[in-house]
Image: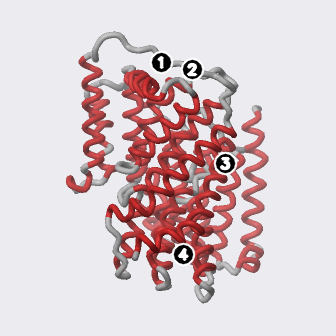
Amino acid sequence: MDKLNKKFMISVPIALALAWGLVSSGIVSDLLGLNLPQSVSFMILVLAALFWVTEWIPLYLTSFMILLLQLVWLVPAIDPAAPKGARAPYLAPFFSEIILLFLGGFVLASLLHKFGLDRRLANGLLKWTGTSPAKAMLGFMMASALLSMWMSNTATAAMMFAILLPVAQKIPEGNPFAKGLAVSIPFACNLGGLGTPIGTPPNAIALNFMATKGVHISFLGWMAATIPFMLFFIFILWFFLLKIFPHGGYQLELPEASEGGLSGVQKLVLGIFGLTVTCWFASDLLDLSIGTLSLIPVILAFGFGLLKGPDFKALPWDVLFMVGGGICLGVGLDKSGLTAKIVTLIPEDQTFWIILVAFGIVAALMTTFMSNTATANLLVPLAVSLNQEVGLLAIMIAMNCSTAMALPISTPPNAIAFGSGLLETRDMYRPGVLISLVALASTLVLGAWYWPFILN
């Protein structure tokens, strides 16, 4: 019996039994003032956080555990007579729009790697940044952030990892800088989404609810409000990563340049790549979701025979299920009423500064464990309903929803990076907590001073 099996057989039954005992005895309800569904959802959240942080069991297995517990424990707690259809919302996240987007990004990355285009792209990027590890990391981060301002940060992360992997794989084993490079891509993608209203869904949610209260900000106004913070966060993150993952004087090796021009197959792959990215950019004009458009590379890659059965099996399905588990957890938190209970704890009769701090902390904590879109959808309407500095509250919540990135399940780009096999949870946790704290402090102090100039 290997080590993993022992951990599973010991930790999971004990954790489940303890969780069930705390709920059934009423201890959770009495201590936290929760009803039965909320108590069950809270314990599922605790179990998910425990297993995701410790990695006692594989992360995708934790996702399946979340699904099982919500189907057999949470659903009956919400409604003992619940019909079978009541379980559908918990199953849907495992083949949701975001999963399709992941799948499309993974297929693009697989195409680029199989036909050597990732090495060509990496060679071109490193010729621009040079072989200095620090400059190369900053180059990767700025490119990731710039792309994420205008397109899906998930798709950007998938594409940038296709460029990064040939470089990271040449770094000697044991050199921590490879992990630093791997962390830099998703974190820069997360931060890049701050820069435009279309960069990430929380931005659009904030703008929408601001408008309902008569607070309007233009596209350029949003960029003026957020880009200074985005750039500041990127440089701070760069500094953190160089300290946490030192390169030790190692100079990066340029990937070997491919000889000759592009082959016909490589041109076809680039055509699929370009078509997919163009469709992502034009999703609003096409009136199709990015997830739906992500089926294009899947169908074309396997339809033309560029990728085959073994390539399909080699896709990181464990990452897809891990992300599905995170979305599923968010569904349970919402259906049980636990998220609504959490936000009611915010002291709305207190001074505005206390309200601002409370919303910032709650947004950062919730987004660490669930979708930033779901968090924004919950917190922004409540914040603007208080009718106190609506624009300031909305922007602050949107930004903290995008800068909480301490776990692989915190954001889709994090999950993609984790799926590369270069990282463990603790590699993301340390810099993720640091940048989350810096972002929280900056938005609460500097944002509260700067944003009124933009909004007035």
- Position of the N terminus, as image quadrant, is top right
Helix, strand or loop under label 3: helix
Q: Quarter-wise, where is residue 253 in the image?
A: top right
- Is disc 4 in contact with disc 1, using a CB cutoff of under 8 Å? no
Q: Quarter-wise, where is residue 263 in the image?
A: top left
The amino acid beneath tag 1 is Pro
Q: CA distance from mark 2 to mark 3?
A: 25 Å
Looking at the rendered image, the disc whose residue lies closer to the viewer, 3 or 1, is: 1
Residue 255: give its label: 1
Q: CA distance from mark 3 to mark 4?
A: 37 Å
Left or right of 293? Residue 441 is: right
**Residue 65 vs residue 236, the one in the foreground:** 236
Q: Residue at x 31, y 30 (%)?
A: 302
Q: Image height check: is 240 above or below 126?
A: below
Q: Earlier in the sequence, mark 3 or mark 4?
A: 4
The residue that mark 4 highlights is 79
Helix, strand or loop under label 2: loop
- Is disc 1 in contact with disc 2, using a CB cutoff of under 8 Å? yes
Image location of residue 222, percent across then percent down: 38, 63
Image location of residue 212, percent across then percent down: 35, 79
Q: Earlier in the sequence, mark 3 or mark 1?
A: 1
The residue that mark 2 highlights is 170
Can residue 245 be seen here? yes
Q: Earlier in the sequence, mark 4 or mark 1?
A: 4
Q: CA distance from mark 3 to mark 1?
A: 30 Å
Q: How many neighbours does mark 3 have within 10 angstroms: few (below 14), some (14-19), or many (20 or more)?
A: some
Q: Residue at x 50, y 78 (%)?
A: 383
